[in-house]
Each structure stands twice: as C-alpha cells, then as structure tokens.
Image (cartoon, grey):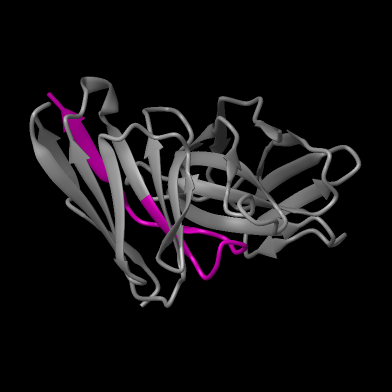
Amino acid sequence: DTEVTQTPKHLVMGMTNKKSLKCEQHMGHRAMYWYKQKAKKPPELMFVYSYEKLSINESVPSRFSPECPNSSLLNLHLHALQPEDSALYLCASSPGISYEQYFGPGTRLTVT
Amino acid sequence: AQTVTQSQPEMSVQEAETVTLSCTYDTSESDYYLFWYKQPPSRQMILVIRQEAYKQQNATENRFSVNFQKAAKSFSLKISDSQLGDAAMYFCAYRSAFKAGTASKLTFGTGTRLQVTL
C-alpha cells in the first residue's frame, strides 16, 4: 500500500459546526503533515507530527485542532471556522521528517 | 529564510515535444534537497523528482530530468516527449537537510501551470 487516503473528499460546513478531516497511511511512515491550499497557490504547512507527537504548529488558529491517535492516522478537528478557511486541505506523510513527503488527494472544504 | 521562485506562471507544449520549467531558489545553506511536485486537476500532489544538493549528477526519472546548477541556484525540470497526462500545475520545492524542527518544512514556489496541446 503506497498511498495516503483522506476523507471526506468534499465537506460543506456552517460556521457553528464541528467537523473532522481524516487522513490515513499504511506505509509505516512516522511523520504526518497537514497543509492548507488556497486556489492557485502553493500549499501552506499547518502542522507536523513526528512519532505521534506534535512537532511543528505554524501558528494556526485554535479553531483547527490536530490529533494523531496512532502512527497511521491523523485527524484535523474543525470548529467555528470562518469563510476564509475554505480551501483544499492536504495531508502528507513521510518515513521520517527528513524524507520526501507523499500527499493524499485532499479534502475540499467550504465554510458557509 | 529560503525562497523559491518560479517565474513562468503558465507554459504550453505540444504533445511529444520537450518543455523546460524554470525554478530558482535562494539559500545560504550548503546541504538541502530540491523537489518537483505535480498537481493535476484531480488535486493530488505527486512527487515527480528529487535532487540532493550534494550530488553533482542531475536526477532523472523516465521522461523527467532536472538541470541542477548549484552555484546559480537554479533547478529546472525538463519533460521530454510530453503527454496529455502531463498537464498539471508544477511546484518546485526546497527543503533543508536535517536540522531538528526545520527539516520537515517544504518551501514551495508559486507554481507553473503546464498545458499540453495536440
């Protein structure tokens, strides 16, 4: 299995909703990442987990809450989002934090 | 801080022809990695090719090759025998060699959209 999967593919949520994005990999990678990508822009790093511990938080607002329950799974919990948070959310993984990253297909999030 | 510049917002190539996408970067580091990622309309970022800065030999993956000029801080991607499936946004990216807390950060360029025509 050489892929990173993300669910759901699309998500529409209101500003008062609570939702979660899920990312899974079964490649034995020990580092996992969340990126945010606006249209026609490169991805922006949000969080990095290394060995299930939060390694980097790029000053992301607290309405985004990451969670790494185990080495294969990464969640992003969403609460009280703003319309400007609408974007493509990409998950990636790598064997370790010094290796190249492999991306999932992304979740297209729309906040209404 | 490192920066990555892609000066060509859009490029077009005819099927079966060759195209070169440009990328320049700025860094004071001597040890680092460079990548080209492809993002088709399906949105998934796909790793195309990687280059270690300490290697003088240019990386090659099938129809994809790079021209890495370390002194000039240039890292261009050549696509030979272009195919319709090559149409995508291409991002150049930089990553420092391992240092705690920094190695995981990819610095991306702004991307080049490649069109492939019949």
**Who's the residue at 22% across and 23% down the image?**
A82
Q: Nearer the viewer, residue A67 or A46?
A: A67
From the viewer's perspective, is B99 left or right of A56? right
**Who's the residue at 84% across and 62% down the image?**
B55
Magenta run includes residue A5? no
Residue A87 falls in image quadrant = top left
Tell me, yes or no, if residue B118 can be seen here. Answer: no
Q: Position of residue A67 (x, y in %)?
A: 29, 56
Q: Is residue B83 above or below residue A15?
A: below
Q: Position of residue A94 (x, y in %)?
A: 50, 65
Magenta run includes residue A98? yes
Q: Determine the residue located farthest toward the right in the rendered image.
A: B71
Tell me, yes or no, if residue B93 can be seen here. Answer: yes
Look at the image and tell me in which quarter the C terminus of chain A lies: top left
Residue A86 falls in image quadrant = top left
From the viewer's perspective, is B24 left or right of B7? right
From the viewer's perspective, is B65 left or right of B110? right
Q: Is residue A81 above or below residue A58?
A: above
Count of number-bearing discs: 0
The magenta stretch is A91-112
**Who's the residue at 57% across and 53% down the image?**
B104
Q: Position of residue A108 (x, y in %)?
A: 24, 39
Q: Nearer the viewer, residue B91 or A110?
A: A110
**Who's the residue at 17% across and 48% down the image?**
A20
Q: Nearer the viewer, residue A65 or B76?
A: A65
Q: Position of residue A79 (x, y in %)?
A: 17, 36
Q: Is residue B69 above or below residue A54?
A: above
From the viewer's perspective, is A47 left or right of B51? left
Look at the image and tell me in which quarter the N terminus of chain A lies: bottom left
